Amino acid sequence: MPATTQVKSNKANAVAVVFKPVESTADTPAKSAPAIARKPLSKSQPFDISARPWQDFRAQTPIDVLVIGAGMGGLATAVGLRMAGHRVTIFEAVPDIKDVGAGIQVAPNASRILERFGVLDELKKDGIMLQTLSLRRWKDDVEIGRAGLMPAVGNKYNAPLMVAHRADLQRTLLNRALALGVTVRTGAVITAIAEDFSPRVQLASGEWISGDVVIAADGVKSFVREQIAKRKGYQNGTMSTGDAAYRILISEDRMKGDQKALGLLRGVTGSRWMGPGGHIMAYPLRSNKMYNMVLIHPIRPTQQQTESWTSRGTKAEMLKTYAGWNSTIRHLLSYVPDGEVMEWTLNSHAPLPSWVENKFVLVGDACHPMLPYVAQGAANAIEDAAVLTVALSVIGSTNSIDDALRIYQAVRKARGEAIQASARETQRALHLPDGKEQEERDRKIRDSTEAATKRELGAGEKRNPDLWSDQQWQDYMWGVDVMKETLEKWSEIVLAQPTQTPISFSKRVD
Ligand SMILES: Cc1cc2nc3c(=O)[nH]c(=O)nc-3n(C[C@H](O)[C@H](O)[C@H](O)COP(=O)(O)OP(=O)(O)OC[C@H]3O[C@@H](n4cnc5c(N)ncnc54)[C@H](O)[C@@H]3O)c2cc1C
């Protein structure tokens, strides 16, 4: 057995993995990526993710990784794998990675990973640490309840909660990837893959490229997802949620003289207005220079399905939709310039039986497209990246890639799909028509706010119907360290069910 990695089980469930540093040769990334100071690990020291700098984590066997898509999932995966010493190439369809999108929530489950990947400090520069989420009535703007966020959430989960512009997160990850020596090919559309899902992809130019593994981070309209579904004889179906979303950004200069709007822009409170059939999530962005609003509403009878982040809506239609909502909202909506309203329809995607096919693996929206109700799309893509980074780095040879992908699926699939499903549940709770059920929901929100404010013993037992604001669901969404879980699952699953592939570590019980 190669003496490269050992799993050490000291106490009942405590498992630590010992890593040997990758030898630096002329063509290993350790040499070509001077941006990171690498401290070699001593063979005898266990790698404890929470105690040691992540920069110390090293792949046993550097492999050639092909990534499709330079969105959040693709870039984060590339950064993690490259830091561990793998050779990574990204293929991105668009010719220029431009500033697209608006607000994105970087929840603690993502910021914990971004910190280890060396991008959190840069993101913090313009990111906003919201202190509170205020849950409000649609009609009269009355506050129903509040969820305390930073710094309490940061202290509890040992990682901050932030809101940032999607473009800032993408740019930060891209710069990091480039600095580490990831090859990024833009204007590179992958149009075909090997029929047997061996790790080969074809560009529109006809060129074929091979690697050891292909990570498909090609977004909600994933081409690879479709191929996997087809191969498994599975319907790659989408179903309308009945909702559509407007997305707007309002700059400070458009709010001149409106003290209420300026207060929202300059503050550290996010607002969630709940109404019949829809809700609005709003918060300040980019060092409080712009106000971000996502407005979810029922699809119009004649509305076309456009599951695209860049499709436009009309301001007039938006104002009509929210004409009956309170004046704070009506004023805010009036400030957005005509022509800058985005609108797209929200679909549910049936889960796939598997995220893995031979040497292809799906990450991000390609495998768990998230509805925006619990704001976990980017965070879960980043979790995928982190788990793949660990799983593909603990293997002792390319023969064990299948094991790594199996562990990835074991750690991520049920969790990703549970969070995906929770978005659907939240949709119902947030969109209740006025009446008995809505009054009951509001009572529960008030009760849970009160219990949390008074720090009552077992306050978390008082469930908040808005799962994003619910302490128990937050523990699940935000509190889990998936990188640690990957190491634990590795010994639990791979050691418990050894495959024909020899695994390059041994178990030691103290
Ligand atoms: C333009 C855009 C704007 C967005 N705006 C927001 C927003 O404002 N707020 C929010 O919360 N979320 C937004 N999202 C979604 C959010 O980024 C994702 O839900 C989440 O981050 C998951 O990331 P992902 O990497 O799985 O997918 P994405 O971030 O969607 O990235 C997928 C990438 O794959 C590329 N790609 C697709 N097919 C191919 C192919 N065949 N070959 C090569 N490359 C390919 C795409 O060009 C894209 O860059 C946006 C996504 C996009 C694409």
Image (cartoon, rainbow, N blue to C red):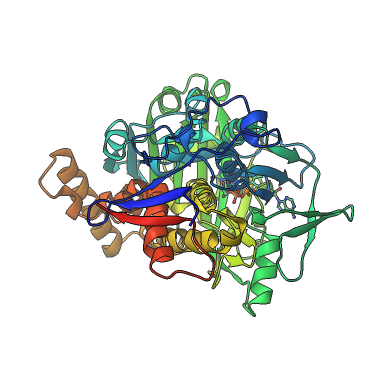
**In the drawing, does residue 503 fall left or right of residue 260?**
right
Q: Which quarter of the picture shows residue 509?
A: bottom left
**Viewer-proximal residue among 252 and 28:** 28
The percent position of residue 403, horizontal first and vertical second, equals: 52, 63
| Left or right, 8 with reference to 41 | left
**Residue 462 higher or lower than 292, as above or below:** below
Camera sees residue 275: no
Which one is nearer the viewer's eye here, 157 or 431?
157
Query: How many marks are shown on the rendered structure?
Result: 0
**Vertical relation: 364 (above or below) 437:** above
Left or right of 75, for residue 131: left
Residue drawn where x is 46% and y is 58% of the image: 412
Residue found at x 32% / y 36%: 158
Asked whether 152 or 191 is in front, the reply is 191
Q: Position of residue 52 (x, y in %)?
A: 38, 34
Q: Quadrant of residue 131?
A: top left
